[in-house]
Image (cartoon, coloured by chain):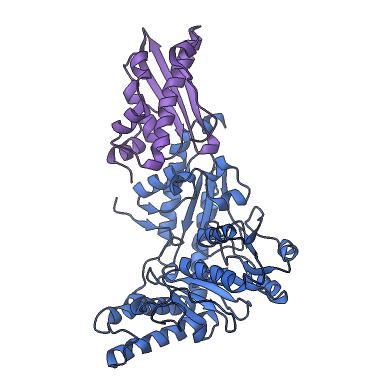
Amino acid sequence: MYSEKVMDHFANPRNVGELENANGIGQVGNPKCGDVMKIYMYIKDGVIQDVRFKTYGCGAAIATSSISTELVKGKTIEEALDISNRAVTEALDGLPREKLHCSVLAEEGIRSAIADYYRRQGIDPEPIMGCALNCAECH
Amino acid sequence: MSRFVYADNAATTRLSETALSAMLPWLQEGFGNPSSVYRLGRAARRALDEARETVAAAIGAKPDEIFFTGSGTEADNWAIRGVAEILGQKGRHIITTAIEHHAVDHTVKDLEKHGFDVTYLPVDEYGHISLDDLRATIRSDTILITVMFANNEIGTIYPIREIGAIARENGILFHTDAVQAVGHIPVDVTAMEIDLMSLSAHKFRGPKGIGALYVRKGVRLPSFITGGAQERGKRSGTENVAGICGMAAALEESVQTLAASSAKIEALRDKLIAGLLQIPRTQLTGDPVNRLPGSASFVFECVEGEAMILLLDAAGIAASSGSACSSGSLDPSHVLLAIGLPHEIAHGSVRLSLGEENTEADVDYILETLPNIVEKLRAMSPLWEEA
């Protein structure tokens, strides 16, 4: 049911852990729904220099978290904000239908870390990003 | 990975050699239709009759009380829908529990759409219903009590004899889904005052695609499938002769060896439970004492079930989970929620179910492997960090 790429990212997740010098930290999802993603970014000169994540969730949740850290690393904030849940899914060679919500979690995770970065810079993220944060409902 | 440990015997079991040998003749030279009058047909008919006697003897029934079906699910559907059809004029109330298998649960829910009133008895932390609740729930229009013999997810065994007595005293039909019980713990339909009971062959090392419904003599049930009048006109369709013979052989063997094999399996199960409960923030689900011999079911906090199952699989261990992500739904299993586990804990369930082929080396391997998997996933879980 999972592609080889999903299984690879699940079994050998990239960029797992925390980032001491993180200046943008986002957390999305809800333990009640069975998935929570926490993402740490270090952003400098408008570029995501480094990124780490921790995820509680199923194989797809961990794999989408892992691939999304690879997708944003080295990207500008604007490029990172352009990463859609679809791009995350495609990068994993697809996800089973019932797991597509996991890719939404990853997209929201990226946005939530960037929103946190803006706030720490004293910038209101809403005019730039629109609604950045996750809904409390299960996807 | 060369090592393979099958620990999902509650999902299905490996066909036994005895069952396979009993099946082969009827797939090869003995291919006749049991309804045919010539020799080839008569041989198949005799095999069918003998298999029916064997199955009946194994559960304390008479041969003409056994009807073969295509699965345990079919037997559940037939029993429940059949009683609703026959007695629907007399009453519209059905009593069941909150922790039934979907084969029962979805069937009574479907009947609710057709004007039946269903009471779902709540359960305690071990998955037990209260017999006082059951007595208090009975109404003058109650036509059926359906309570599973043993739970597939948490292993809890129900007091079927007591429930049977309550149903009988009140003149209400009693059905039990005994799919997880038959062949694993003693079952006697007569002593336990059971009116209808569902069985499935592949849970006791018989083949898939064959089950049976026990219907106590005197209980009226409509035909479930109409056609060529097989199964005394109640369930038409040319009989699955090989499947039926495999089922009978597997059941006979399971029942004959039950005492010795269940003692052996229980010892392995207890070692597995004791070992896994060493993992911090881990709970056994289901009744710790009165549970199926092979069933070891747990919840591990801050990790998700499907992730554990996939990593177990990568290590060569087959197990299952009641988490939402393993079922394709958004909610974890209704059984785990009914025993009072919060959603976030129910997502972390793993069920290991042992069978007679499992060895102590298998248990040791699981005990070497699963704690590391839980630790690995907890190390990357933001919930564990907060905990």
Instruction: Name the colour assigned to chain A in the rendering.
Output: purple
Q: Is residue A30 above or below residue B76?
A: above
Specify whether residue B252 is in view. yes
Q: Residue at x 61, y 56 (%)?
A: B98
Residue B320: x and y in percent read 44, 52
Residue B360, quarter of the rendered image: bottom left
Q: Is residue B369 above or below residue B158?
A: above
Q: Residue furthest left?
A: B29
Callout count: 0
Q: Is residue A62 above or below residue B60?
A: above
Q: Could you tell whether B385 is left or right of B36 in the image?
A: right
Residue B160: x and y in percent read 63, 70
Specify whether residue A59 is in view. no
Quadrant for the C terminus of chain B in the image:
top right
Colour blue, chain: B
Residue B142: x and y in percent read 68, 68
Residue B354: x and y in percent read 46, 61
Residue B26, quarter of the rendered image: bottom left
Q: Residue at x 49, y 68 (%)?
A: B264
Closer to us: B209 or A73: B209
Q: Is residue B263 above or below residue B122?
A: below
